[in-house]
């Protein structure tokens, strides 16, 4: 048998104080991100905020500061530019609250064709989203998040006992917050795809939690006399290798997707990658810890099991 | 002994079904198949999303309020005509607000006559509270407003459909969304700007007489630079006679390419509108300049004949969407039911104008509230990158499983291959649309797909460590891991379903692949690999399992 980890006996629960601080910081950042989003101060993608994004592919390299100057001289002052150097591509994003009637995309194209007549380009893609649509998408995303969270909690609560459901939900919430906070700190755009990644992650990070909980529940039934902390620690150690291997296989596919999947999928896979790693951590240190510190003894934990 | 034959037959059938469903998605291969086979096979496979094949996705909103205003304006004209016919001397008939018509008159005794005339317009009712000695106010009924709004969107839908048909796009999608939105999807289109203009143009054609009697008509500037229209209108504010308006003609100087505007003082009254057209075609004029010749239907021809005969030697402006195209002098009565729209067109512009005129005017202006345009090269690029990262990811996982679980890893890889084939077959069978996030969903399925087998294998290892025989360990591993696997799949499935219900476009594509991938994974992991293990156990007594 080839094993990454042999038989382990790590006192995970003993390290819960360090984990508590670490998770606390992650969650605080996530909460900060949510506050900023609701205040409208976060870096929301144009699919939520409304605005214009134009991606141009040039024949020759173009410097980003030159491009910015050209746009500014034509009155497009609040443009965000991003370049993809090896492909001579530039992404121009303009978040405006004005109506789509202004045809910002056409203006951007016109600026580049008059300012750089020698450097021919094609419009790879252009996106214009009116503010009402952005608002609708925000609402839809929020409903999707609420529905899936409610669904997950209900399912876990039905399959396990109520406090397992709560612990799993807290861990899931922790993971989503951690990724959101990470994106906020890195000033990455929060787009529809990133929200999709967060939801997928919420579903997937539960996989690890379920595996750990399953074993803890099994052990609790078999060893009613033992100390809860020991039972939980043993459970985690017994399934540690599968928790890590299942996450590892997903990490293995996410790495090529992040590196070579193209700019559209980059942030999406990054969110998932970050989330899967955090999810593995949280199934051990957050979900299980909540079980441990839940008021009442192991007997009460098993009341209905 | 467990029977394995039935399960192998099931796997074989599922595989064949998947391949059969997938074949139409690969035209190069599909075309070479014999006819009898094509007859049995499905004809439609996976469709590529707009982000992969290029094209435009528009969400348009009908400006309903404008549609109501336009309808009220039309009634105002009709009321005016009828009052003139009956020789009732009202001072003015005007639209006030969006839905009201105010009639003003000098003599108080006209009131009853006017009320009688208005009885012929049952969609309006009198607002008695607003009545004064010299004016009456009528308002459009609520039911009528609703009807106008509703028919505006249906008419817009119909018109856009006509225009797209004539423009020629393969597999367009044009449908109503919600109460007042229209979704237009044109895959694979190469001239997005032209298509958008074609859809958005209101194309309201109107014939209006010039007001040549007013002093202002003489004082208008010959021509003004482009962009100064607003300024000119501001300067002339207050001087424009009641019932008149100023409209501009676009002129391009042939040599310099500079654009100018020529202002015209025209009467607001619409003599004839585009709804009486029966045809519009492009023709080439004397100097090789294209123009559009329009043909009126019988009613329109009669009207045009009357108007021209009554207004010989006067000038008539041909106005499209409030821009004057030309303002020729009516030389003589025109009875043939034809007219020409000339202007400074390119051939393509003339062609597009003919299309929109044939397809009819939009009942109200449209607002583009969402516009996604993807160029064909980006789509190609995305597919290449998607395939590359899929293969790369697949390679990593396959290798990892083989190294970590040896022969059992190979069995898991076999299940993974089965999983992917079934997933693609199912996508094709459902005629699902594959988007870029959808490809990401497939890649995720690769990573999550082996998870079930990892859970099972780890459990088998545990059983083996306890000293159980291979067969018991395998059976125990599958049994005990089953519930965990189902639990972990269901949670992901719940979020997948939420995404499917509330996601749009590419996100929906992702949700579909994710949900299908998970469901199929349950099958391949529990049936696919188990049957292989059972076969191995059946052949001979296995002392050691390569796991």
Image (tube, grey):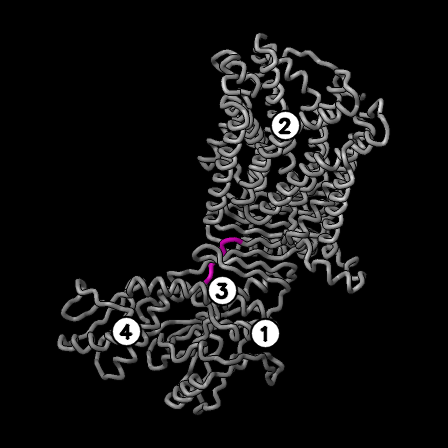
Cα separation, mark 2 vs mark 4, equals 72 Å
Few, some or many C-alpha atoms within 10 Å of disc 1 (few <14, some 14-19, many ≥20)?
Answer: some
Mark 1 vs mark 3: give the one in front.
3
Q: Which residue is mark 1?
A: B351
- Residue segment shown in magenta: B366-370
Q: Quadrant of residue A226?
A: top right
Residue to which mark 3 is pinned: B157
- Closer to the chain start, of discs 3 and 4, is 4
The answer to whether mark 1 and mark 3 are in CB contact below 8 A is: no
Position of the N terminus of chain B by quadrant: top right
Q: Which mark is residue B484?
A: 2
Give how far apart the Cα atoms at labels 1 and 3 are.
Answer: 21 Å
Q: Nearer the viewer, residue A8 or A220?
A: A220
Q: Residue B264 at x, y = what percent?
A: 41, 75
Q: Earlier in the sequence, mark 1 or mark 2?
A: 1
Screen quadrant of the C terminus of chain B: top right
Q: Which residue is mark 4?
A: B121
């Amino acid at each position: 048998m080839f094993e990454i980890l042999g038989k382990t006996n790590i006192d995970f629960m003993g390290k819960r104080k360090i984990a508590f601080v670490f998770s606390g910081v992650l969650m605080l950042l996530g909460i900060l991100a949510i506050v900023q989003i609701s205040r409208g101060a976060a870096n929301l993608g144009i699919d939520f905020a409304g605005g214009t994004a134009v991606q141009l592919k040039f024949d020759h390299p173009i410097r980003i500061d030159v491009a910015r100057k050209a746009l500014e001289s034509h009155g497009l002052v609040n443009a965000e530019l991003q370049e993809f150097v090896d492909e001579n591509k530039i992404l121009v994003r303009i978040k405006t609250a004005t109506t789509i009637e202004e045809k910002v995309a056409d203006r951007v194209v016109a600026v580049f064709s008059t300012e750089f007549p020698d450097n021919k380009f094609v419009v790879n893609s252009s996106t214009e989203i009116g503010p009402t649509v952005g608002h609708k998408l925000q609402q839809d995303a929020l409903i999707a998040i609420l529905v899936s969270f409610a669904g997950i909690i209900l399912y876990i609560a039905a399959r396990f006992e109520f406090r397992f459901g709560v612990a799993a939900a807290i861990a899931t919430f922790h993971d989503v917050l951690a990724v959101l906070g990470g994106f906020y700190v890195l000033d990455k755009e929060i787009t529809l795809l990133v929200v999709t990644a967060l939801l997928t992650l919420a579903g997937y990070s539960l996989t690890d939690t379920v595996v750990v909980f399953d074993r803890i529940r099994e052990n609790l039934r078999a060893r009613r006399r033992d100390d809860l902390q020991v039972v939980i620690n043993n459970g985690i150690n017994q399934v540690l290798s599968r928790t890590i291997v299942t996450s590892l296989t997903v990490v293995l596919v996410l790495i090529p997707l992040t590196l070579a999947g193209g700019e559209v999928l980059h942030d999406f896979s990054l969110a998932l990658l970050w989330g899967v790693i955090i999810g593995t951590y949280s199934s051990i240190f957050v979900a299980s810890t909540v079980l441990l510190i839940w008021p009442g003894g192991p007997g009460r934990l098993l009341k209905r099991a | 002994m467990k029977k394995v034959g039935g399960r192998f037959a099931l796997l074989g059938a599922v595989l064949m079904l998947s391949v059969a469903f997938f074949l139409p998605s690969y035209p190069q291969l599909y075309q070479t198949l014999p006819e009898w086979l094509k007859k049995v096979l499905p004809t439609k496979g996976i469709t590529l999303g707009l982000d992969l094949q290029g094209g435009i996705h528009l969400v348009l909103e009908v400006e309903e309020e404008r549609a109501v205003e336009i309808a009220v304006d039309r009634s105002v004209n009709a009321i005016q005509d009828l009052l003139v016919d009956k020789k009732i001397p009202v001072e003015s008939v005007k639209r006030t607000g969006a839905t009201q018509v105010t009639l003003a008159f000098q003599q108080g005794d006209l009131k009853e006559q006017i009320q009688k005339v208005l009885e012929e317009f049952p969609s309006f009712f009198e607002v008695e509270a607003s009545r004064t000695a010299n004016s009456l106010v009528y308002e459009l009924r609520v039911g009528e407003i609703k009807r106008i709004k509703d028919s505006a969107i249906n008419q817009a839908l119909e018109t856009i459909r006509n225009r797209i048909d004539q423009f020629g796009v393969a597999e367009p999608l044009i449908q109503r969304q919600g109460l007042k939105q229209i979704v237009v999807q044109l895959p694979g289109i190469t001239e997005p700007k032209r298509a958008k203009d074609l859809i958005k143009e209101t194309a309201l054609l109107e014939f209006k007489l010039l007001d040549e009697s007013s002093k202002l008509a003489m004082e208008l500037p010959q021509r003004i630079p482009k962009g100064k229209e607003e300024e000119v209108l501001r300067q002339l504010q207050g001087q424009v006679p009641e019932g008149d308006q100023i409209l501009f003609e676009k002129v391009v100087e042939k040599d310099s390419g500079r654009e100018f505007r020529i202002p015209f003082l025209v009467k607001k009254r619409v003599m004839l509108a585009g709804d009486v057209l029966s045809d519009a075609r492009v023709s080439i004029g004397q100097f090789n300049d294209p123009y559009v010749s329009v043909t009126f239907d019988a009613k329109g021809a009669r009207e045009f004949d009357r108007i021209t005969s009554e207004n010989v030697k006067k000038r008539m402006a041909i106005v499209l969407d409030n821009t004057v195209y030309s303002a020729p002098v009516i030389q003589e009565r025109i009875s043939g039911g034809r007219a020409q729209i000339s202007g400074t067109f390119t051939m393509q512009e003339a062609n597009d104008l003919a299309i929109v005129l044939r397809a009819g005017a939009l009942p109200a202006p449209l607002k583009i509230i969402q516009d996604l345009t993807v160029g064909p090269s980006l789509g190609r690029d995305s597919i290449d990158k998607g395939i590359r990262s899929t293969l790369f990811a697949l390679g990593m996982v396959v290798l990892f499983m083989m190294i970590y679980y040896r022969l059992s890893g190979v069995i898991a890889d076999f299940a993974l291959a089965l999983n992917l084939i079934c997933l693609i077959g199912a996508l094709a069978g459902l005629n699902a649309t594959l988007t870029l996030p959808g490809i990401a969903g497939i890649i995720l399925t690769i990573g999550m797909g082996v998870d079930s087998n990892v859970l099972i294998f780890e459990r088998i290892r545990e059983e083996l460590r306890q000293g159980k025989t291979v067969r018991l360990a395998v059976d125990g591993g599958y049994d005990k891991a089953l519930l965990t696997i189902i639990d972990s799949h269901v949670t992901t499935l719940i979020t997948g379903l939420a995404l499917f219900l509330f996601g749009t476009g590419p996100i929906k594509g992702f949700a579909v692949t994710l949900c299908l991938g998970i469901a199929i994974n349950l099958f391949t992991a529990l049936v696919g690999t188990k049957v292989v293990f059972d076969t191995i156990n059946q052949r001979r007594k296995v002392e050691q399992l390569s796991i």
